[in-house]
Image: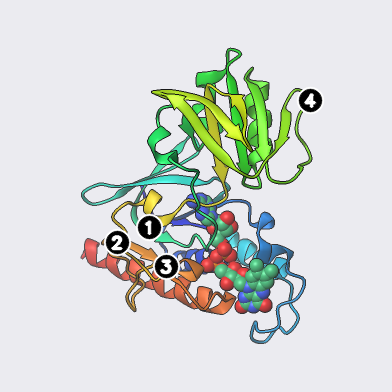
Amino acid sequence: MYDIIIIGGGPAGLTAAINGRVRNKSVLVFTNDWKQTYLYQAQRIDNYPGHPGISGAEILDSLVSHAKELGVEIDTKRVLTIMPMDDHFYVSAGARVEQAKTIILAIGTGSHKKLPGEENWIGRGVSYCATCDGLLYRNGKKVTVVGKAADAVEEANFLNEIGCIVTFVSQKPVEGLSDGVKSVIANHLEIKGDGMVQALVADGNEIPSDGIFILRQTVAPNDLLPSLKIEDGGIWVNRRMETSIPRIYAAGDCTGRPLQVIKSMGEGQRAALSAVEDLDHLIN
Ligand SMILES: Cc1cc2nc3c(=O)[nH]c(=O)nc-3n(C[C@H](O)[C@H](O)[C@H](O)COP(=O)(O)OP(=O)(O)OC[C@H]3O[C@@H](n4cnc5c(N)ncnc54)[C@H](O)[C@@H]3O)c2cc1C
């Protein structure tokens, strides 16, 4: 069991991780690949104190190496659910499930817009993780991947490799799809079925589907934790960066404006210090 699991490896999550390790807590960071973020691509940041003109890549690379040097474990996996238990939490990311005494949410912002009626099809053919659920469809079943995340191409290729018949639907053409994966460009998507999913309707054309994998970069905070309080579009926190759920803290863009690097780092540090104080209080 980890002392702290952090979801999100941007400036907030990595600063929290560094501060948790400095205080000798075991820390695991689950994150999407930070090299795929907009910040990583930013050529020039002019309001990062003491380092005018530093690039986003330089900031993130130095945070990652600092965290790793201190013994932070970083796993590039997307967290899909967090399950609160009496005195700890289960966190599932891809096929990996871990436990922690405290959680820090540092998931940034992103589009969480759902397809019409999407929630009604969860468990009835709609899935958010190819590595977790792909094997259900391996014997020549038809699956459609809705590619909204940077790693969606990889996931589609994995489904193709294990024997699914894969259609990849995206808003723009993508590179890297394996031979055998059909690509469809479409904007308006709907799910069709009768008890179980039967097709994805893409710009009016039906794509027969036994399963639909919707792969987004981020998961809405309330999908991770349905009882989490949201205010003005961000996760509600107090000055200790505590959320409405005990022993879950939040930091960075996901708590709201201003959406800036050093605000995120400051909140990341405060969240880690609060987690450490609460962990020490649990022991004493
Ligand atoms: C083009 C651009 C230029 C910018 N320029 C500046 C600037 O000059 N100065 C400035 O101060 N700010 C700038 N910003 C804003 C700055 O990038 C953000 O404020 C900052 O990155 C927020 O840090 P964060 O850690 O809260 O979130 P993020 O940096 O968004 O990191 C969150 C990470 O968590 C991952 N994640 C989300 N959900 C999950 C999940 N369920 N499982 C696993 N991982 C997950 C995300 O993929 C991401 O890697 C810029 C932003 C952009 C887009």
* Quarter where residue 207 is shown: top right
Which numbered marker is on residue 63? Answer: none
Judging by the rendered image, the residue that carries numbered circle 4 is 179
- Considering only vertical position in the picture, is 165 above or below 201? above
Q: Earlier in the sequence, mark 1 or mark 4?
A: 1
Tell me whether the residue at label 2 lies in contact with that at label 1, contact meaning CB atoms closer than 8 angstroms: yes
Q: Is residue 161 left or right of residue 9?
A: right
Considering only order in the chain, which callout, 3 or 2, is on the residue closer to the N terminus?
3
Q: Along the polypeptide, which appears first: circle 4 or circle 2? A: 4
Mark 3 or mark 1: which comes first in sequence?
Answer: 1
Of labels 2 and 3, the one closer to you: 3
**Distance (Cα) linking label 1 and label 4:** 41 Å
For label 3, the crowd category at 10 Å Cα-Cα, with few meaning under 14, some 14 to 19 and many 20 or more, is some
Q: Quadrant of ligand 1?
A: bottom right
Residue assigned mark 3 = 234
| Any part of residue 9 in sight | no
Mark 2 residue's CB less than 8 Å from ligand 1: no
Q: Secondary structure at mark 3?
A: strand
Asked whether disc 4 touches disc 3, contact meaning CB atoms under 8 Å apart, the reply is no
Mark earlier in primary sequence (4, 3) = 4
Residue appearing at x 66%, y 28% in the figure: 167
In the picture, the quarter occupied by the C terminus is bottom left
Q: Residues within 10 Å of mark 1 (few under 14, many from 20)?
A: many
The residue that label 2 is drawn on is 247
**Labels in figure, total:** 4
Q: Which mark is residue 103?
A: 1
Residue type at mark 1 is Ile
